[in-house]
Amino acid sequence: MLLFILFVLLSSSLHVFASKPEADALLRWKTSLLNQKNPLLSSWSLHPINVVKLNLSTSRLNGTLTNFTFSSFTSLTHLELRRNDIFGSIPAEIMYLSKLVFLDLSGNHFSRTIPQEIGMLVNLETLSFHSNNLEGHIPVSFRNLTNLGYLRVDDNKLSGYIPREIGNLENLVKLSFSHNELSGQIPISIGNLSKLEQLYLNNNQFNGSILKQLGNLKSLVELILLINRLSGPIPDSLCNLRKLEKFTLQNNKLSGYFPETIGKCTKLRNLVLSDNSIMGSVPESVCNLISLEILHLGNNQLSGSIPGISINCRNLEVLDLGDNKLSGGFPYWIDTRPEKQVLILRGNKLNGTLHTSNTKTPFPKLRILDLSRNQFASLLPSNYFNNFKAMMSIDRAASGELYMSENYMYDDTVVLVVKGLSLELERILVVYTTIDLSFISREQWIMRFRLAKNCGDDRVTFSLVPEEHEDDTIFDGFSWQSVVMGYGFGMLIGLGIGWVTFHLRTPRLYNMIAQEPIQNRK
């Protein structure tokens, strides 16, 4: 039997090789679609042979599957309809596709529940329903899909529990239930999925403790549990995950001490535990994480001094220890990491005198520096600011990425205070830079953008001084062009938002504008 492969490109014609019943079935479904003027539909032609693979992805199809005669496609092994405008329910008749190996309905507008009949497709190896409007529970019948290696139902409106029968799917490599409304405890049976490499349960309402059985998943590379209601300590069993590269637990209710054993996960690139209630000191074992690129421990109850985290971490880009109870002096070893882009130490009890760095070119790629709300007793040395090349550059978007660390599933939250108004950025544009040194001693300090008295000098002098000592200079070296660009860009956005808000007289529009990057990040 010749294989049928139907590839749809935006500009291509659609030639369907099908038996007479299959051809008739496709034509009946075609006539039920709403956008009959779609040139891809008008170009369909039919030739006699069995259909084995049907790929209509990204074809601007608009309609339902109600008139799709599944029973006519008994030889079908691949069905791909992703990224269209198909709506309505997933018909129970899909069970007739008994030879189906690959099913992808993602990126549509399917609603209602996932039919239990999906569990009859026992040959499935890939199943993807993500980015739809599916509701109801995860079908218990999934337990029959023991050949599945890839299961995605994320970004829907699913509720209820994860059935314990999910542990039957021992061939799973990727499992994603993220961005739903699932609740209850994570079932212990997930610890049976020994081949699992990626586990995404984030953005749900899971509660209870983190399972020690997760330490059985020796193949796990990515463990993403952020934005849930998980509580209790981080279990030591997770030190068994020697292949783990991404571990994010932010925005939960975790307590207990920072696990010393985390240092055994030497392949970790992302470690994000922020927005919890983790206490105690940051263990020295963190220095063993030689592959670390992002370390975000902000908004916890951590205390003690900052260990020499960056000594071994040559690729560290983001270090966020803000809003804790850390004490001691400024960690000068941080400026030896050439890849550092974000350094946030705000809201701690750091103190002591700040002296000139011994590093020849400290922080060449730094774009965000926040030392605010600490107790430093002196000014930050000027050689730091003279070397902030990335902040001075106007070609920061050369990489083509819109947001920082787009490849690392890291959405840092930066809070700015402008004239008493707190502004929160959920994601960081690559063109965004900021320095916050407010309230860095026991006295109230203020920032002054002040043009140089010498008109022949094209540099601007910045001062961070107590009100009674306004002659002390903290740093210089930023060109007047950079400052004017910053003021001009900010003023343009501010005037634009202000004009629209004034004319429409509704705060809702402002919220829409502020939240747009969050909604578009998927």
Image (cartoon, rainbow, N blue to C red):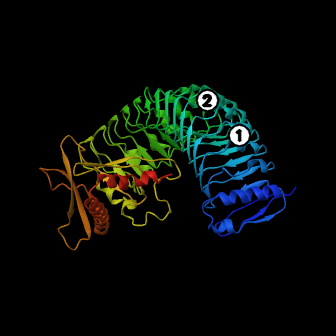
Q: Using the image, tell me which numbered label, if any, was put on residue 148.
A: 1
Instruction: Label 1: state its secondary structure.
Output: loop
Q: Which residue is mark 2?
A: 163
In the figure, is residue 273 to the left or right of 35? left
Residue 36 x, y percent position in the rendering: 63, 65
User: Which mark, residue 336?
Assistant: none
Q: Position of residue 10 (x, y in %)?
A: 64, 66
Q: Farthest right residue?
A: 1
Closest to the observer, 4 or 166: 4
Callouts 2 and 1 close, C-beta under 8 Å = no
Q: Secondary structure at mark 2?
A: loop
Residue extending furthest toward the left: 468
In the depicted structure, whether residue 37 falls above or below residue 178: below
Crowdedness near tag 1: few (<14), some (14–19) or many (≥20) residues, C-alpha within 10 Å: many
Mark nearest the camera among 2 and 1 is 2
Viewer-side residue, 515 vs 382: 515
> Is 46 left, or right, of 231 in this rendering?
right
Q: Position of residue 480 (x, y in %)?
A: 28, 68
Q: In the rendering, at what x and y percent does residue 322 appear?
A: 36, 41
Where does the N terminus fall, quadrant-wise? bottom right
Q: Residue at x 79, y 53 (%)?
A: 52
Mark 2: amino acid: Pro
Residue displayed at 81% across by 59% down: 18
Q: Amino acid at mark 1?
A: Leu
- The quarter holding residue 439 reads top left
Please say whether residue 32 is visible from this viewpoint. yes
Question: Badge 2 local density, few (<14 within 10 Å), some, or many (20+)?
Answer: some
68 or 10: nearer the eye? Answer: 68
In this picture, residue 428 sits left or right of residue 457:
right
Image mark count: 2
Q: Is residue 12 above or below residue 349?
A: below
